[in-house]
Amino acid sequence: MAEVLVFVDHADGAVRKPTLELLTLARRLGEPVAVTVGAGAAGTAGVLAEHGAVKVLTHEAAEYADYLVVPKVDALQAAVAAVSPVAVLVSSSAEGKEIAARLALRIGSGVITDAVDVEAGEQGPVATQSVFAAGFTTKSRVSKGVAVITVKPNSAAVETAPAAGAVEELAVSFSAQATGTKVVARTPRESTGRPELTEAAVVVSGGRGVGGAESFAVIEALADSLGAAVGASRAAVDAGWYPHTAQVGQTGKSVSPQLYVATGISGAIQHRAGMQTSKTIVAINKDAEAPIFDLVDYGVVGDLFDVVPQLTEEIKTRKG
């Protein structure tokens, strides 16, 4: 059976959920071969095998932490040469998309970004994308070389499928460009205790209707009751009410959770472009004519400061 490379996203050996989703998708195309690099890479093998990796290619070197992107591209290029896969799957983070683009250029292949589904086709892997602010769904395939595809988080359910997970050391020769951009300092992100926005299964977002920075406490309380991440519209971010890292939309982050709750958000196309692929969408807005209601599965017309606290309390009651 054909092999499919999956590039592993991990932090010191802790595998992130989007990688496990990629392994699920890879099994549709062939036998998943995981490529895991950097500090703690060898420690990821057990989890990867549990989720379907028939083989785990590892390489640990200081370059992966000390320099940006290129060492990881070198490793993936070495893996492609060693395995001759039918496809390479990478998570659709900002770094992931840069790695995929650089790899495709090096190996003379096409690249498809931000796929929301991947399936086998007669002429190679077929990727489904949501394009033009989620106004259209397209199916595409790479017509030249090995298909390099980045996949949005939450595009597939994580499924366990125990496999051999044979660990092999990957031989990597770093290119001259690998040491071109050095990391000179790191500042740990302040932890909120909430899930990462792009990976969260549930997202609660606030917009202009929230009215101010202090009022986001209402949104955060609802999010915490659901175990959700907190997002914000561009209007709320531009007003300085919430950090830019939480912005959802065309100029912010793109999310695709199982549940998206929009509070005080009108539904401008800029925001819709970043969340329209969510599986279930709920909106709370006092304007019954707000464009967001054209998009939602469930809508509540009302003042968010009346509705959201009641919703939060009801969720806590049912959970407790």
Image (cartoon, grey):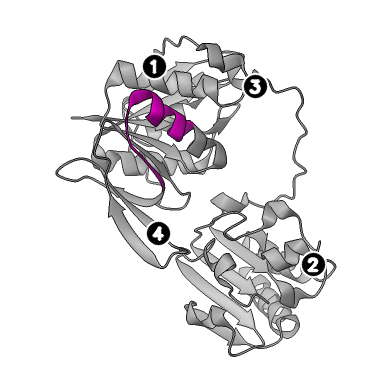
Q: Is residue 120 visible in the rendered structure shown here?
A: yes
Q: Label for residue 181?
A: 3
Which comes sooner in the sequence, label 2 or label 4? 4
2 vs 4, front mark:
4
Work out whether 186 lies above or below 314.
above
Label 3 and label 2: CA atoms lie apart by 40 Å
Q: Is residue 165 left or right of residue 122?
A: right
Which comes sooner in the sequence, label 3 or label 1? 1
Badge 4 local density, few (<14 within 10 Å), some, or many (20+)?
Answer: some
Q: Secondary structure at mark 3?
A: loop
2 vs 1, front mark:
1
Where does the magenta region start and end? 99-113
Q: Residue at x 26, y 22 (%)?
A: 84
Label 3 and label 4: CA atoms lie apart by 33 Å
Badge 3 local density, few (<14 within 10 Å), some, or many (20+)?
Answer: few
Work out whether 189 lies above or below 279.
above
Q: Is the Cβ of the residue at disc 2 closer than 8 Å to that at disc 1? A: no
Q: Amino acid at mark 4?
A: Ser
